[in-house]
Amino acid sequence: MNTVSRLPEFIQRLAARLPHQVDNTIRRLAMLSLIGQTVLVVTGGAVRLTSSGLGCPTWPRCTQDSLVNTPEMGIHGFIEFGNRLLTFALAAVAALMLVYLSNLRKERRDLFLLALGLLASIPAQAVIGGITVLTRLNPWVVGLHFLVSMALVVLATLLVNRAYGRAGGFMNRSLPALPAVARPVMNAVGLFSAAAVMLGVAVTGAGPHAGDADAPRNNLDWDLVSHIHAVPAYLVTAGTAFAVYLVLRKGIAGPFRTAVFLLLGVTLLQAVIGFTQYYNGIPALLVGAHMLGAALLMAAATNAADLARHSPQA
């Protein structure tokens, strides 16, 4: 009874200690969310590329009799269960972010809603992962699992930009003005990046890395889909090259310049990895690097488009 009666006072003391403005802890949690979502893409790739997709053959338990992997399951069980555990870690980070934002939920509604979206999406992602296992790695469900991860990378990038005052209603208003054409160009680059990632899912579903020797494939022509997948990738490269031209021609400084050159670096890296794996028999290590590159591409494209949208126009 005494504990219950003291609970409201305890909550009030706790709330008083939480930040009333965006501080370094909130910024670090936002960055941790982005890093964690990117790592989740890498570990998900490791599950597929090591044929560990059914390392835990059931869901939500790892086996019929155990919540966790057992020594008898070997490395495949360890890899699959480790990927599942990372989901819980990301949920904890998102929940902690909401706690730290509790005093700012009205003033910084943008941050609160993005953090809430991340937290709400993580259980949905876990359910899709479970369906993936229960459907014995159906390639379309596996692809959906990956695309949701890409969407969470986008949300986490938006969260970071707003936590650091790089975009949104609370951004640094002293940023340099951008040419009017920068906004539609970067929006197009973002859309083409998303299209390239979605078509990449179809390529992977037709390729040899199914996550398990007995997993089904989508029966598409891998070579044809690969060439179709390259079309939006070329458009991303062209749009990014034009953005670089704008930055250099107009002498644009500040975060947008950094974002454009970061996007250029990621785009070129993805192109090198993509061509190398295509002409070398799709080695698993390069496929994993390409998956990491997809997450970095979505983050970089989102960052550049977000900055272009909220920067003043010349």
Image (cartoon, grey):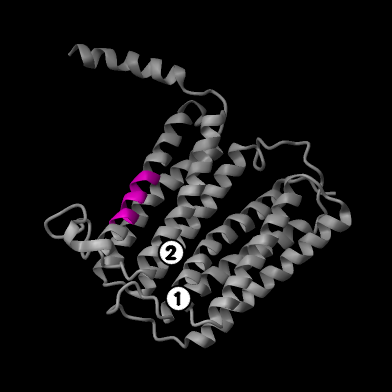
Q: Is residue 252 above or below residue 22?
A: below
Q: Quadrant of the N terminus?
A: top left
In the image, residue 286 lies at what x, y percent? 50, 71
- Residue 82 is a magenta residue: yes
Q: Is 47 or 200 nearer to us in this picture? A: 47
Q: State whether the magenta stretch is mostly helix, strand or loop.
A: helix
Residue stretch rendered in magenta on the structure:
81-90
User: Residue 146's mark?
Assistant: 2
- The number of callouts visible is 2
Q: Position of residue 18 (x, y in %)?
A: 47, 23
Q: Identify which residue is drawn at 82% across, 62% down.
A: 245
128 or 279: nearer the eye?
A: 279
- Count neighbours of disc 2 (C-alpha within 10 A) and say few if under 14, some if 14 to 19, many if 20 or more: many
Task: Report the amino acid beneath label 1.
Answer: Thr
Q: Which mark is residue 82?
A: none
Give left or right: position of 216 versus 164: left
Q: Earlier in the sequence, mark 1 or mark 2?
A: 2
Q: Residues within 10 Å of mark 1 (few under 14, many from 20)?
A: many
Tell me if residue 106 can be seen: no
Spatial distance from mark 1 to mark 2, Cα to Cα? 11 Å
- Residue identifier under label 1: 204
Q: Are marks 1 and 2 in contact (CB under 8 Å)?
A: yes
Q: Is residue 43 above or below residue 156?
A: below
Q: Is residue 159 above or below residue 69?
A: above
Q: Secondary structure at mark 1?
A: helix
Q: Position of residue 228 (x, y in %)?
A: 58, 82
Where, by quadrant of the figure, is residue 184 drawn?
bottom right
Residue 120 relative to residue 242: left or right? left
